[in-house]
Amino acid sequence: MTELLRADNLVKAFGSEGGFHIGARKQPVRAVNGVSFSVTTGETLAVVGESGCGKSTLGRLLLRLIEPTEGQVHIGGVDVTQMSAAELRAARRQMQMVFQDPYGSLSPRRTVAEIIAEPLEVFGIVKTRQERRERVAELLEQVGLPPTLMDRHPRQFSGGQRQRIGIARAIALNPDFIVADEPVSALDVSVQAQIVNLLQDLQEAKGFSYFFIAHDLAVVRHIADRVMVMYLGRIVEIGPKRSIYTAPQHPYTQALLSAAPEPDVKKRTKRIILSGDVPSPSNVPPGCSFHTRCPLAQEQCRQVRPELREVAPGQTAACHFAEPNPIKLPVSAPAYAS
Amino acid sequence: MTRPLLKISDVSVEFGPKANAIRVVDSVSFSIGAGEAVGLVGESGSGKSITSLSILRLIPDPPGRIVSGSIEFEGQDLLKLPANRMPEIRGRDIAMIFQEPMSSLNPVMTIGDQIAEALMLHQDLDRDARWQRVIEVLSLVGMPDPAARLGAFPHEFSGGMRQRVMIAMAVACNPKLLIADEPTTALDVTIQAQVLELMKSIRASVNTAILLISHDLGVIADLCERVVVMYSGRIVEEGSVESIFSKPEHPYTRGLLQSIPRLDDDRKRLYQIAGTVPMAGSVKKGCPFYARCDLRVDKCAAEMPPMFEFSKQHKAACWVTGEAEQ
Ligand SMILES: Nc1ncnc2c1ncn2[C@@H]1O[C@H](COP(=O)(O)OP(=O)(O)OP(=O)(O)O)[C@@H](O)[C@H]1O
Ligand SMILES: Nc1ncnc2c1ncn2[C@@H]1O[C@H](COP(=O)(O)OP(=O)(O)OP(=O)(O)O)[C@@H](O)[C@H]1O
Ligand SMILES: [Mg+2]
Ligand SMILES: [Mg+2]
């Protein structure tokens, strides 16, 4: 297994330059706050975590779609953060992004064929109009859309159809590395199955690596090799999928897993409902940033920030109490459980 | 049941020039009782959003239009109402959470002002009370530090936070019917659980009825009593959550339920319904699921099946399972 990507101590602070709050003193938001990890060739690293914890920002940093405040990203041994604009453009062939908001990321004035073919043209992969239409048709078919629609505009498509246009564009160049930001969230489960299978087939055939942002834990369980759990801009746990799902060590990971709804009316059961306020990313609590909601928090947690440390082979967690046995959280049955 | 709160009868929607219009919603009928929660599920592109937009008469016209049917809300046909009466109904009686949070929020207005504006149109509150209510609804949707975020613009929020702003705007006025189009797709499971709780609590406190569009069948199972399943512009199955999830009668619904990745399974590949979805309006005759169905017989290609009744609570449009039942 060779290392394809490495992120070292990435930080992104927003709002240190502009006004985020009116009235109140400006507080920069540290959306990503000292994140380090690596991805190997052909691997899928899935990222989960609360809304607003910095997943999309991290994905954008990896491809340098935004500039980091601190830290480096190496892809294939080359420091992406030091590349010139021209080098970066050339490197884009190897790294692509599927955006979370399919509407905002597809230009409304262009046809689907133009949108999907753009990267193919930029890199001179298709030369004639005929070639272009053939490749676009093939890509549309792969994502389960009829090729006859290639001359339509994005607004004529439903939410899930647009999402698939974004996926077709991202896989067009056969990149090494794809940041997929909630790529299947807008899809019904049958189309979702089709896309997840497609992403896995491409990975097998071409050795793609994925940085896969998702909140559906069942999908993550299906597609990931390793899982990274984020909370307020930091990694709180990372490890092989099996360990994360069967022996989660961080209390936040445990709460997350217990909150996943299951499509079974009889299973409306035991969620760990987190109490306490969700802290604001512009005002991160001292000590462990999860302590305000953690059912196990002790004095130590309010004072000292726990570092990531190995709790099982390949699995690291940032919790003072994540050792040696996985913690059993008190499970409160929610009021609505039938 | 007495008169339902909302009764959609035989609604069809077409797009494009009249001469070769594409019918994306085809003779859809269903109703929602006061305080009831109904789930709308179905293949991507099957017409769920268009159906819900037609309730509020928000279909972009041109190129789209509602070509037939009626939509009765509290006994009054919304499709016959003068257009200038609609704004009064939107937001106050019927609120909608749109599928695309970014394109439905105003990018140059702070989120505090946007929610306050929604309140101002429909509720008689003085300025201070209004701001209090804005902060209150934002904290109900789990927004961290809501008072400090009133002055932020939509682009300063993450995807899920924008979705929560939309939810806050929709519930602010205690509507009689809440239409929620994929309200939790951008949310992680803990916030999702919180939003589901919020929807349950407004149901309990002000008896709001809910039309929930979601592809997350776990969310549907959690919140709804009834489910309507769409495929290629048509309703193919309808019934109580219990009976549809335990005994689906339409082959599409069966395939859909089989495609769900489960938390406790380690299959190498996900089950996938063979073939691809026909484009809405492309199947002119017979059952739209025909080409992908393992139960198909000749009759299915020739004639669209009617809704067969499997029980008082359960109907499905399939010749094969339907006739076996009779
Ligand atoms: N341009 C910006 N200006 C100011 N703050 C920003 C900006 N972009 C993101 N943020 C803030 O950074 C934090 C992380 O945002 P990000 O979009 O990365 O979250 P996320 O984990 O992807 O969430 P979601 O699951 O909701 O998509 C949020 O608090 C958000 O408000
Ligand atoms: N402006 C338009 N012009 C032409 N066709 C359109 C237009 N808007 C939507 N459609 C078509 O109408 C059909 C139904 O779209 P709708 O948005 O209702 O689907 P949906 O069921 O909500 O799907 P999703 O789950 O992907 O959101 C789709 O096939 C879409 O391509
Ligand atoms: Mg995001
Ligand atoms: Mg939709």
Image (tube, coloured by chain):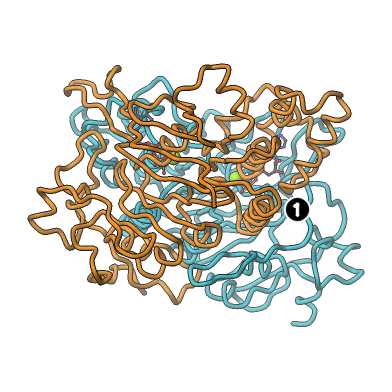
Chain colours: A orange, B cyan
What quarter of the picture does the C terminus of chain B occupy? bottom right
Residue depicted at x 50% and y 35%: A77
What chain does badge 1 belong to? B
Q: Foreground: A337 or A242? A: A242
Q: Is residue A316 left or right of residue A130?
A: left
Q: In the drawing, does residue A58 fall left or right of residue A144? A: left
Residue found 78% across the figure and 82% down from its top:
B324
According to the picture, the residue beneath numbered tag 1 turns out to be B277
Q: Name the foreground residue: B92 vs A296.
A: A296
| Residue A320 % position (x, y) | 18, 58
Q: Quadrant of residue B157?
A: top left
Asked if residue A187 is positioned above or below residue A130 in the image, the reply reads below
Residue A45 coordinates in the image, percent (x, y):
49, 51
Q: Is residue B204 left or right of residue A193?
A: left
Q: Left or right: where does residue B290 sit relative to residue A27?
A: right
Helix, strand or loop at mark 1: loop
Type of amino acid under label 1: Val
In the rendered image of this protein, does residue A263 appear above or below residue A27? below
Residue at (71%, 36%) from the top-left corner? A172
> Image quadrant of residue B59?
top right
Tell which of B40 and A101 is nearer to you: A101
**Visible in this render: residue A306?**
yes
* Mark 1, other Cα within 10 Å: few <14 / some 14–19 / many ≥20: many
Q: Position of residue A224 (x, y in %)?
A: 52, 57
Q: Residue furthest left?
A: A299
Mark count: 1
